[in-house]
Amino acid sequence: MPDTDSVPDVELLVREDKLKLLFRQSFPALFISYATALLLSWMLWGHASEVVIVAWLAMLAVSTLGRLAVFIIYFRTRPSGVDLLKLERRYGFSLMLSSLIWGLGALLVMPADSLLYQAITLFILVGMAGGAVSVYSARYPMAVGAMLSVLLPSTLWMYTQAGKEQLGLAVGASMFMIAMLRTAKVMANALQVNFQLSRELHAAHAAADQQAKTDALTGINNRRAFLDHGEQITRYCERHELEISAMVMDLDRFKSINDGLGHLAGDNVLRHVGELLLTTLRRSDVCGRIGGEEFAVILPHTSGRDALAIAEKLRQTIAETPIPCGERRLDITISIGVAAGAYDLTTLLVHADKAMYRAKAQGRNQVVRYEEAFVA
């Protein structure tokens, strides 16, 4: 049966795409970040409080393990939709926590009496901040939050110092942050436009493909789509040795409805039958309009006896559901032929069609099975 679900939310899909990119490109940064902290600690060892350095590395290790747990969940479950959005919150929280530990910890381990090591520390922090903008650019708030968390504490501290060297470093870091804010915005917008165009093109192609396969009047498969889907299901049932049945149905006295009440009334009848097929049949069944007032259904994993029961239920539903037509209600009936026992779609449809014509010949508004109607 055709997909009757609503068109996917492009904005949600774009957000998912950006989050998936974020997880992929930020995973290596998890280890690079801690390795950089080890490098900075090694450089400052003997020039700063060793207790503070060890404590900082320990806290950073814990936060890194927490972030690693989020990545493990993602790579194991590959979430999407609401589940991915929930994981985004955990990812963002762990990133901000780790970034704050980085920024505040670097400030604490930075020697207050050594301009050289202050400059070295700030140089490392600028590199970390620039990397954050690049790595987390898929989500602008995260990129900006990580950058400011890493670099802002030490920059503000340097503004409080008396030396012009520290002031110069602070001004330079501030200019860098301003430039990175702009860069992060440009990168985020570029990614947004790229993913948006990709998703919109995909949605347009999917809509065009669906339109090409759908009967415009009834909303079910057209003849071409029905035959394509029918062939696939027939081959599947044959491979797995599953029973398969087919129904061919034709509206009784449809020409008199068109001639007597007009084509609009006839179109309304066809539309009504299409809606009943969509609501009555199982989701695994494939239905289509294969002619003017002729419909067909493929029923996978269904015996001929079960197909008869389904056809009879459908016949009764159509007969017992009058169609509003102006000030009157129009009663319609349908003749249905059922066939089973073959793994060839053409054979099934030919047999069901013959059974349907036998139902017409026997008085209409009934169901006839091919094996019961024709004996070789």
Image: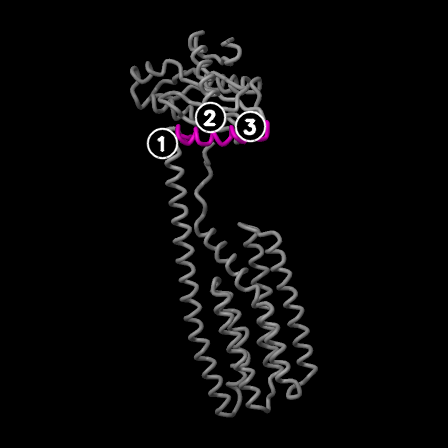
Q: Is residue 194 above or below residue 97?
A: above
Quarter-wise, where is residue 74 in the image?
A: bottom right
Q: Could you tell me residue 112's position as x and y percent?
A: 59, 88
Q: Earlier in the sequence, mark 2 or mark 3?
A: 3
Q: Residue furthest right?
A: 51
Give the number of the disc on residue 277: 2
Q: Is residue 331 above or below residue 5?
A: above
User: Which residue matches tag 3?
Assistant: 238
How would you classify the magenta stretch by its main secondary structure?
helix
Q: Nearer the viewer, residue 204 or 145?
A: 204
| Left or right relative to 47: residue 230 | left
Q: Which residues are magenta?
A: 220-241
Q: Could you tell me residue 235's position as x and y percent?
A: 52, 30
At x 30%, y 15%, the residue is 260
Q: Could you tell me residue 281's position as x and y percent?
A: 51, 26
At x 56%, y 68%, the residue is 29
The answer to whether the residue labelled 2 contacts the one labelled 3, judged by CB atoms less than 8 Å apart, is no
User: Which residue matches tag 1?
Assistant: 216
At x 43%, y 79%, the residue is 175
Total residue callouts? 3
Q: Tag 2: Cα neighbours inside 10 Å, few (<14), some, or many (≥20)?
A: many
Three-letter code for the amino acid on which mark 3 is drawn: Glu
Q: CA distance from mark 2 to mark 3?
A: 25 Å
Q: Residue furthest top?
A: 362
The answer to whether the residue labelled 2 contacts the one labelled 1, judged by CB atoms less than 8 Å apart, is no
